[in-house]
Amino acid sequence: MVEERPEREGMEFDVVIVGAGPAGLAAAIRLKQLDPDRTVVVLEKGSEVGAHILSGAVVDPIGLDRLIPDWRTDPDRPLKTQVAEDRFYYLTGKGGLRLLNWSMPPLMSNHGFFVGSLGSVVRWLGARAEALGVEIYPGFAASEPLFAGNGALIGVATGDMGVGRDGKPKPSFVRGMELRGKYTLIAEGARGSLAKQLIARFRLDEGREPQKFGIGLKELWQVDPAQFQPGLVQHSFGWPLTAGASGGSFVYHYGDNLVSAGFVVHLNYTNPTLSPFDEFQRFKTHPKIAKTFAGGKRLAYGARAISGGGWQSVPKLSFPGGTLIGCAAGFLNFARIKGLHNAILSGMLAAEKTHEALAQGRDNDDLVAYENAWRGSDIGRDLHKVRNVKPLWKRLGLTAGVALGGFDMWTNQLAGVSMFGTLKHGKSDSDSLKPLAEVTPIVYPKPDGVVSFDKLSSVFLSNTNHEEDQPIHLKLKDLDVPIRDNLPKFGEPARLYCPAGVYEVVYDDEAAKTNPRFVINAQNCVHCKACDIKDPAQNITWTTPEGGGGPNYAEM
Ligand SMILES: Cc1cc2nc3c(=O)[nH]c(=O)nc-3n(C[C@H](O)[C@H](O)[C@H](O)COP(=O)(O)OP(=O)(O)OC[C@H]3O[C@@H](n4cnc5c(N)ncnc54)[C@H](O)[C@@H]3O)c2cc1C
Ligand code: SF4
């Protein structure tokens, strides 16, 4: 029997925004700049603005310059370190090659950009938004889209609080709220849980290439001052990834002896025994890299998916009542590993089109002007130039793919043309794994506890916390798939691609592998969304846990 819950209370706004990342906050700020009387609310599932934000980050300031032209003179500005030097490496097992900067396509240069923490950027943007009268509610996850009788999106509902693991209300039960808006902007970042439902419901991906993703892992280190080079921005590709996998690393020096080190693995890798977490740990042991961390202290750890399909994978962005913005729309430039600038620009563009519609007295219709504008905007120009890089990497492998991808970026940037037209991505990331029987298993070295670490001690540094007595937010469509299908065919890859050790296969007798069972340690989840993307059976759906749960990143 379905148990009755009380009616939800509702609140009305001009615009409801889901997600207090750079896209959502830029949209909120722009709406208020255009009309201070508009009522704008932003919902954020993290316990505070920035708690779930993880990025590099080297920031192309084009978005910030347009949104807040005086940001560079604000004494409290969150970005103070300017890029001083760009280095690109091709790594081999023991050595590597530094690529000459002049050989890199100009769009890969970070000259004039800033290095810092995106968490600090959004906290600062949040304060600016609140000063303009935007209502921001951290600790509230938008768990359900709300639709009118005619099918248009009319807002979102926040999740109920105080529900036990058995799905029944506890004494602390509080019913969720309905936040209804004339327009709702979805700014959930890569693989948003509402965005996924809306893309399916309104068939927004029809006629587009599948969205592609990567998983980005990051650690923040306080390094020995002798190893610190303020403004040094270093990228690498190659080792430790081998055939069938692509991605690369970043190491950014900024602030007070801080180094942001990370690794992105494209989620179209083929070997099911690959562990993105362990690839990252191994990367840090490379002789050219490890010295940076000697005598330093690891302060924080986290992981987050990034969307990377670019130009050809962006779904239709508008539908009755709402729009997708930022990385929920797929606006990350994968070749540059940059999405913050496009998140801000798309938030602004959507806000401007929403403002125009509201000024005409419209509501809950299709903001098709936004969909029609982005390809001809700076966002479109940014993504168009790099549209073939990822397909070329996939088709030709590392060396030839990187070389031709680089050549293609040159011709696109200098002449506005590509000899390849627009290449297709083909398969989705969940379709790319080969069966265990067809691969050589990857064996990872044990962590040394100095530069490389295990998953559990890493998750500890993400300050992840979920109320334990709540329904598991990682939903399996079919409970039997992990052991019946995924284990024999792929060795159940969720054990390895999850960067937080959420998924385990346990046995009565580990050595004899008897009676395997699939265990979900949902309380460890850092909300990266990799399982929702990579599960070969597409059997896992990430849903919002009780608001406020998840990582508590301070400076990521
Ligand atoms: C490892 C890594 C390195 C990167 N490096 C760089 C870089 O150097 N430079 C750069 O420009 N970009 C970089 N990026 C990309 C950049 O971080 C993103 O492009 C940018 O954060 C996208 O902004 P967004 O607002 O669209 O989404 P996000 O920043 O992901 O913000 C989304 C917000 O919405 C909230 N949210 C999600 N769902 C809900 C819900 N249902 N209810 C309520 N709240 C919700 C989330 O908690 C989050 O706060 C990197 C990304 C990663 C993962
Ligand atoms: S359970 Fe899924 S979303 Fe959570 S950390 Fe693991 S892979 Fe990421």
Image (spheres, grey):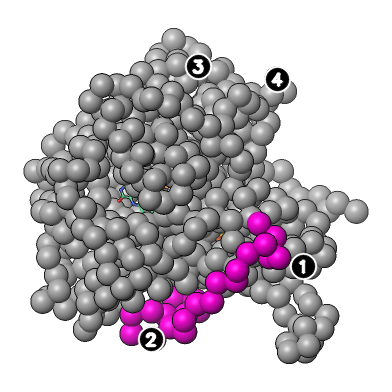
Q: Position of residue 289 (x, y in %)?
A: 26, 71
Q: Who comes first in sequence, dot 1 or dot 3?
A: 3
Check disc 3 and give the amino acid type. Val
- Say if mark 4 contacts mark 3, CB within 8 Å: no
Q: Who comes first in sequence, dot 3 or dot 2?
A: 3
Check disc 1 and give the amino acid type. Pro
Q: Quadrant of the C terminus?
A: bottom left
Q: Secondary structure at mark 2?
A: loop
Closest to the observer: 116 or 143? 116
Q: Who comes first in sequence, dot 1 or dot 2?
A: 2
Q: Which mark is residue 449?
A: 2
Q: Secondary structure at mark 3?
A: helix
- 73 horizontally vs 421: left or right: left
Quarter of the image for residue 440 reads bottom right
Q: Who comes first in sequence, dot 1 or dot 4?
A: 4
Mark in the foreground, 3 or 2: 2
Q: Which residue is mark 3?
A: 368
- 236 horizontally vs 479: left or right: left
Q: Which residue is mark 1?
A: 488
